[in-house]
């Protein structure tokens, strides 16, 4: 059976949802004094899955395990004041470190007593 042709402009998506990380993020010194629970969600557009699927070879796709471990290590490596800073720096780092074409990244923080969470959401594309 012949396989259907795929366009070279297509991209497929890998998602990591609510990756739990404990990091020091907050405007005040007191808020940064202890690590806080963050949930990070990533949506990564990558080149077509067809080569990886056709060969069943992890080396032909983006390892979501490696991305998740990298994101956790990057987020906890140093304190930051703003979620916006974490999101921007992490998105750019992931784009440089993995063959990701476009990334949408959301970080949730549980800091307001009357809200489920606050979050920042950004989208960045490989230059």
Image (tube, rainbow, N blue to C red):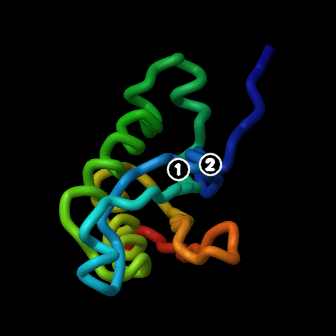
Labels 2 and 1: the sequence-earlier one = 2
Q: Position of residue 60 (x, y in %)?
A: 43, 31
- Specify few, some or many for label 2: CA neighbours under 10 Å numbering under 14, 14-19, or 20 or more: some
Quadrant, the C terminus? bottom left
Q: Position of residue 109 (x, y in %)?
A: 52, 67
Q: Name the residue under label 1.
A: 46
Q: Where is residue 61 in the image (x, y as percent from the top left)?
A: 46, 35
Q: Mark 2 points at which residue?
A: 13
Contact check, label 2 and label 1, Cβ < 8 Å: yes
Query: Residue furthest toward the bottom?
Result: 27
Query: Residue 93 bears which disc, if any?
Result: none
Instruction: Name which residue lies at 61% across and 32% down.
Output: 50
Q: Is mark 1 on a helix, strand or loop?
A: strand
Q: Using the image as rendered, state which of residue 98 and residue 75 is in the foreground.
A: 75
* Image position of 45 with respect to 84: above or below: above
Q: Position of residue 66 (x, y in %)?
A: 36, 37
Q: In which quarter of the image is residue 108?
A: bottom right
Q: How far apart are the two marked residues, 2 and 1, measured between alpha carbons?
A: 6 Å
Q: What element carries label 2?
A: strand
Q: With 64 as the anchor, is 117 left or right in this view?
A: right
């Amino acid at each position: 059976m012949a396989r259907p042709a795929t366009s070279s402009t297509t991209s497929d998506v890998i998602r990591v949802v609510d990756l739990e990380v404990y990091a020091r993020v907050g405007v005040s010194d007191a808020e940064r004094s202890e690590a806080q629970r963050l949930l990070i969600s990533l949506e990564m557009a990558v080149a077509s899955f067809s080569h990886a699927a056709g060969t069943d070879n992890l080396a032909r796709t983006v390892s979501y395990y490696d991305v998740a471990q990298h994101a956790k290590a990057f987020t906890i490596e140093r304190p930051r004041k703003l979620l916006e800073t974490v999101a921007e720096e992490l998105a750019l780092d992931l784009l440089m470190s993995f063959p990701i074409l476009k990334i949408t990244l959301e970080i949730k923080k549980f800091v307001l007593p009357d809200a489920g969470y606050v979050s920042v959401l950004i989208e960045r594309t490989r230059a």
